[in-house]
Image (cartoon, rainbow, N blue to C red):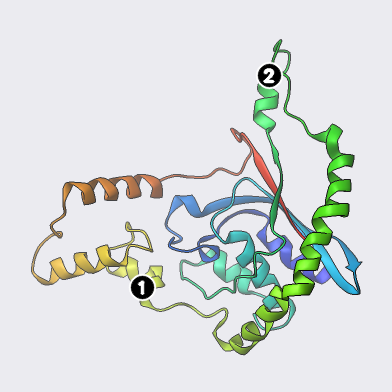
Amino acid sequence: LDEVNAIFKHYEGTHRFHNFTTGRGGFEGSVRRYIISFGIKQTFVHKGMEFAEIVVRGQSFMLHQIRMMIGMVVGISRGILPKDLPESVFMGHERYHIPRAPALGLFLDRCFFRDYNYGVIGVKGRPEIQFDRFDDDIEAFKASALFPQICDKELEEECFAQWLPPFLDHAPNWGKIKPEWDNEKVLKEQGLEHLSMHRKNEREKVLAARAKGQTKPETSAEEEKEQAEDEEQNGIEVDEGDEGDDEFCCGRWP
């Protein structure tokens, strides 16, 4: 457990998580996410099979982010992925092939309204949003109803058991840099780093226009509006959670 938790530690802090979602590159401000803590809380046995309860607490998460973080930890712990991969996926701009673990067992555990609670201290009629007094009831419900249902589903459908063989079969591909259109270095060389990773058709239009000697492709008003919104989104910066965070999410994965 100590070795696995040491891998989870690589995720903590503020990093560019573009390799743990789809359609985004490292140059986009929105891929900067803050992870407060990540690790295995406990292990338990259910009907003869051992399960691990994994808890991640962060400011916010992107599509598939937690599942891909789990997938990389599984790959490193099994010796399929190199131990120094976390440094590469965060420091560089390249897109890597990262395995995505099944979604079974992943759920939102609770939200934290830290800054809201700070703001209402001493304000009459506006109580703090706290769930501490329900902790015992929440944990009892998870232990008696939620966890057994998740574990029974795994025993019945073997989601993880069926995921592992294909994962192992494609071991040579995991951790490798993706091809040209998913490689931010290539996009920068082509002057296309301002476009989202998922907008391949638009990038192709730009290159086609350049081949014709045009400075930019012809676009409709709707396309210009969409591009403006996308560029505005790319400029969003996510801070480290020291100031101005309204809520945190804590997910659990038995």
- Quarter of the figure with the C terminus: bottom right
Rendering coords of residue 250 (x, y %): 71, 48
Circle 2 residue:
120
- Callout 2: SS: loop
Please tell me in which quadrant of the rendered image residue 205 appears.
bottom left
Residue lying furthest front: 156
The kind of residue tagged 2 is Val
Residue sitting at 53 percent across and 52 percent down? 32
Residue lying furthest left: 213
The kind of residue tagged 1 is Trp
- Residue 127 lies, with reference to residue 244, above or below; the image says above
Q: In this figure, what is the number of numbered marks?
A: 2
- Quarter of the figure with the N terminus: bottom right
Residue sitting at 59 percent across and 74 percent down? 99
- Residue 2 lies, with reference to residue 82, above or below; the image says above
Rendering coords of residue 68 (x, y %): 61, 67
Q: CA distance from mark 1 to mark 2?
A: 48 Å
Residue sitting at 68 percent across and 63 percent down? 10
Rendering coords of residue 25 (x, y %): 43, 62
Residue sitting at 64 percent across and 80 percent down? 81
Q: Earlier in the sequence, mark 1 or mark 2?
A: 2
Please tell me in which quadrant of the rendered image residue 170 appears.
bottom right
User: Is the residue under label 2 in contact with that under label 1 (CB below 8 Å)?
Assistant: no
Neighbour tally class for label 1: few under 14, some 14-19, many 20 plus, Cα within 10 Å: some
Q: Nearer the viewer, residue 49 or 241?
A: 49
Residue lying furthest top: 124
Circle 1 residue:
181
Tell me if I can see residue 12 in this picture.
yes
